Image (cartoon, rainbow, N blue to C red):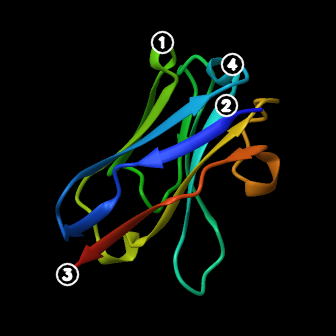
Amino acid sequence: QVHVVESGGGLAQAGDSLRLSCSASGGFFGRYEVAWFRQAPGKEREFVATIGWNGTYTYVADSVKGRFTISRDNAKNMVYLRMENLKPEDTAVYYCAADHHSRQSIHWYDYDYWGQGTQVTVSS
């Protein structure tokens, strides 16, 4: 079993930067694909970015491309989401999720292990 915990969320102003962190314990996190999703109030969970187990594969949603960067440090069992030039529409709960099948998926239902989420609120 993999236990996933997100951190780094908070309040920001438009144009600010934040870095979210995803830590994991148990299982073989360093061999799993890991993604970030987000969910705003009243909206469906939305794919943000994903990274392959060794970091060579990354894919970022068009809505955040050029502003968000995903990376990982397997020695520390950590995955990061660097968010720059934040916009009010980035306000959401951000979730980290791991897929032990490494399917390179943008679909939330393909991910097996989830954290509780971290709130990001961006004011204009």
Please tell me which of labels 1 and 3 falls first in the chain: 1
Quadrant in which the N terminus is drawn:
top right
Residue 106 x, y percent position in the rendering? 69, 50
96 above or below 46?
above
Query: Which structural element holds mark 1?
Result: helix
Query: Label 3 vs label 4: CA separation?
Result: 39 Å
Please tell me which of labels 2 and 3 falls first in the chain: 2
Query: Label 2 vs label 4: CA separation?
Result: 7 Å
Question: Which residue is at a point 74% across and 54% down the rendered structure image?
Answer: 107
Query: Which structural element holds mark 3?
Result: loop
Residue at image mark 1: 75
Query: Nearer the observer, disc 1 or disc 4?
Result: 1
Amino acid tagged 4: Arg
Residue 54 x, y percent position in the rendering? 58, 16
Amino acid tagged 1: Ala
- Disc number for residue 124: 3
Amino acid tagged 2: Glu
- Asked if marks 2 and 1 touch (Cβ < 8 Å), the reply is no
Residue 37 image-quadrant placement: bottom right
Question: Which residue is at a point 64% across and 68% down the rendered structure image?
Answer: 45
Residue at image mark 2: 33
| Residue in front for this viewpoint, 115 or 91 | 115
Residue at image mark 4: 31
